[in-house]
């Protein structure tokens, strides 16, 4: 089975004992939470500045999200995170935004002190490391293989961990919880989150080219860094998924698109979106959401130069 080949190769790449392939990155986040089989009313720390799928996974799992604002790197503010931990907190979810890596030493220290599990949303961070250790490998890592990701196919996702007993639960739940006997006696909730072999084949091809693609991304980051106005610079990314910049008004994205640049808006704070509008703690992320936009990095060097020239002309 191609998906089993992918599981072996991807766990080897990330440096974990195991991997379970699923059909989307959102499914990976959801089943990762479900497989922890947490008690009712458990709280999950969630970053405000993230793709909303991170929070939706908590909602799908019928758990209580506790949103923590970002700092000036757009990553979860770890000082505020500790202040948000309660006796009901069971999980810290972090997102490595745009290929910029959270300080995992501090996250793991908190998790150990408060006896919490850690889920890394690494959808935008394939190949990124913190102090030489691959992101996604600290406790539970979730990846997306959507078509615009660093390792990609048409769709797909994965859960990785060194906790093989936990991964057995993930594996069972993502396949309808049939159990090893497949006798139609389902003893826990299950989901149809299986990855097809055709999906796996595309992702395997991309994984075989990941080092080359990371080189392209980093080179274009260097080009952007050399040309971007100093007032627009954001903290560097380890492996850039995209190149985010700070602008006076990110509505210039629409003009850039009209000029053929694959520019996009940055994220909005999760709790400004449904179904999370009763939550707050959005001050920093809300400010940045009005000013952050990003440029593509998986492009030719000539296009990178042209993209930045067009951006500069509008600033």
Image (cartoon, helix red, strand yellow):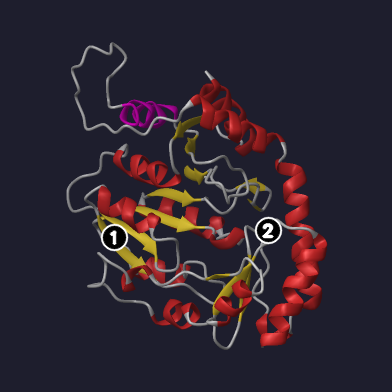
Majority secondary structure of the magenta segment? helix
Question: Where residue 145 sits in the image (x, y, percent)?
Answer: 54, 43
Whether residue 124 is situated above or below residue 293 in the rendered picture:
above
The residue nearer to you, when weighing 102 against 2, is 2
Whether residue 310 is situated above or below residue 135 in the rendered picture:
below
Kindly report the distance in space between the C-alpha atoms of the residues bearing marks 2 and 1.
Answer: 28 Å
Q: Describe the element under mark 1 as helix, strand or loop.
A: strand
Q: Quadrant of residue 258?
A: bottom right
Label ID, residue 238: 2
In the rendered image, residue 15 lying in the magenta stretch gets the answer: no
What residue span does the magenta drawing correspond to? Answer: 164-175
> Alpha-carbon neighbours of circle 2 within 10 Å: few (<14), some, or many (≥20)?
many
In the displayed structure image, the side of residue 67 where residue 138 appears, left or right: right
Question: Where residue 255 sits in the image (x, y, percent)?
Answer: 60, 79
In the displayed structure image, the side of residue 7 where residue 278 appears, left or right: left
Q: Earlier in the sequence, mark 2 or mark 1?
A: 1
> Alpha-carbon neighbours of circle 1 within 10 Å: few (<14), some, or many (≥20)?
many
Q: Residue at x 81, y 74 (%)?
A: 226
In the displayed structure image, the side of residue 274 where residue 3 appears, left or right: right
Question: Where residue 56 sits in the image (x, y, percent)?
Answer: 32, 55
Whether residue 240 is situated above or below residue 236 in the rendered picture:
above
The residue nearer to you, when weighing 90 against 223, is 223
Q: Residue at x 27, y 13 (%)?
A: 182
Quarter holding the C terminus is bottom right
Name the residue beneath numbered marker 1. 65
Label ID, residue 40: none
């Amino acid at each position: 089975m191609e998906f089993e080949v992918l599981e072996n190769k991807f766990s080897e790449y990330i440096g974990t004992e195991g991997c379970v392939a699923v059909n989307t990155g959102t499914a990976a986040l959801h089943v990762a939470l479900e497989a922890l089989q947490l008690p009712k009313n458990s709280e999950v720390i969630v970053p405000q500045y993230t793709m909303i799928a991170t929070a939706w996974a908590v909602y799908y799992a019928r758990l209580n999200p506790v949103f923590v604002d970002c700092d000036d790197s757009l990553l979860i503010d770890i000082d505020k995170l500790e202040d948000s931990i309660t006796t009901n907190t069971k999980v810290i979810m972090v997102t490595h935004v745009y290929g910029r890596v959270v300080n995992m030493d501090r996250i793991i220290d908190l998790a150990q002190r408060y006896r919490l599990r850690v889920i890394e949303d690494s959808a935008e961070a394939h190949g990124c490391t913190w102090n030489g250790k691959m992101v996604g490998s600290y406790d539970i890592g979730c990846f997306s293989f959507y078509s615009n990701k660093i390792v990609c196919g048409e769709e797909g996702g994965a859960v990785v961990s060194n906790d093989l007993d936990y991964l057995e639960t993930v594996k069972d739940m993502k396949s309808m919880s049939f159990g090893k006997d497949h006798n139609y006696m389902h003893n826990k909730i299950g989901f149809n989150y299986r990855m097809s072999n055709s999906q796996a084949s595309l992702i395997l091809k991309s994984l075989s080219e990941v080092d080359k693609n990371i080189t392209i991304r980093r080179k274009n980051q260097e080009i952007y860094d050399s040309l971007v106005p100093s007032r627009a610079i954001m903290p560097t990314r380890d492996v850039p998924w995209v190149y985010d910049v700070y602008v006076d008004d990110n509505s210039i994205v629409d003009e850039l698109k009209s000029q053929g640049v694959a520019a996009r808006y940055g994220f909005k704070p999760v709790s400004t979106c449904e179904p999370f509008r009763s939550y707050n703690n959005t001050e920093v992320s809300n400010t940045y959401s009005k000013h952050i936009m990003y440029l593509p990095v998986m492009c030719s060097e000539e296009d990178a130069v042209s993209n930045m020239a067009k951006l500069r002309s509008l600033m």
